[in-house]
Image: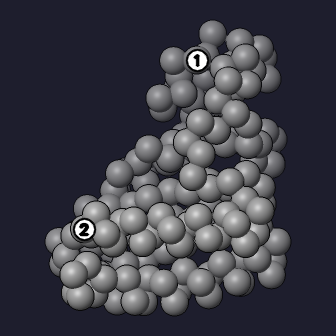
Amino acid sequence: MLVPFSSLPSHARVWVYQSSRVFTASENEEISAILTTFLSNWATHGTPLKTAFELRHNQFIVIGLDEEVKGASGCSIDASVHMIQSLESKYGLELLDKMNVCYREDTEIAYTPLKEFRKLAKTPKVSPDTIVFNNLVVDKAEYESHWEVPAYDSWHSRFIK
């Protein structure tokens, strides 16, 4: 059962998928339609899941699940990963590679391999105040308060000189 993201409780589980590039306007619409269809029918052992999603900055897919209603099983999580993989294939995106980092570069969002980010963190280009996206957040409360944060306040801080 698909609900507005804002109606999910703060303890709802979240998954953040960062894209290797910005979605075009038509991709945004198509991805939204695909997510709406998938999440409206997402279930575990025949029981519908209370879910929501949002597309942020035309580059991030955020899926939320109210596990208090019903938690996802291994099979239902596999189904969601397959859906994300189908988006990767259809649109030529990288969404599942966790070894990449997104950070703000002026008004743009930069996407770079972690290895490159580590090098940049030793230069003035990336500082402790650089805004990074902490895609390791686990619930809606943490997503809303600790997803887009200065590097010094994230796991990224270990790489800053």
Q: Which residue was labeled with disc 2? A: 73
Mark 1 crowdedness (10 Å alpha carbons): few <14, some 14-19, many ≥20:
some
Q: Which residue was labeled with disc 1? A: 159
Q: Quadrant of the C terminus?
A: top right
Apparent side of residue 85 relative to residue 147 in the rendered image (left or right): right
- Name which residue type carries label 1: Phe
Residue 70 screen position, x and y as percent: 19, 76
User: Up-down: is 151 above or below 86?
Assistant: above
Q: Residue at x 64, y 38 (%)?
A: 100
Q: Quadrant of the N terminus?
A: bottom left
User: Of the residues tagged 2 and 1, which is closer to the observer?
Assistant: 2
Q: Residue at x 82, y 71 (%)?
A: 24
Element marked by disc 1: helix
Apparent side of residue 144 relative to residue 115 in the rendered image (left or right): left
Distance of mark 2 from mark 1, alpha carbons? 35 Å
User: Up-down: is 29 above or below 67?
Assistant: below
Residue 26 screen position, x and y as percent: 80, 81
Disc 2 and disc 1 in contact, CB within 8 angstroms: no
Residue 107 screen position, x and y as percent: 80, 48
Q: Earlier in the sequence, mark 2 or mark 1?
A: 2
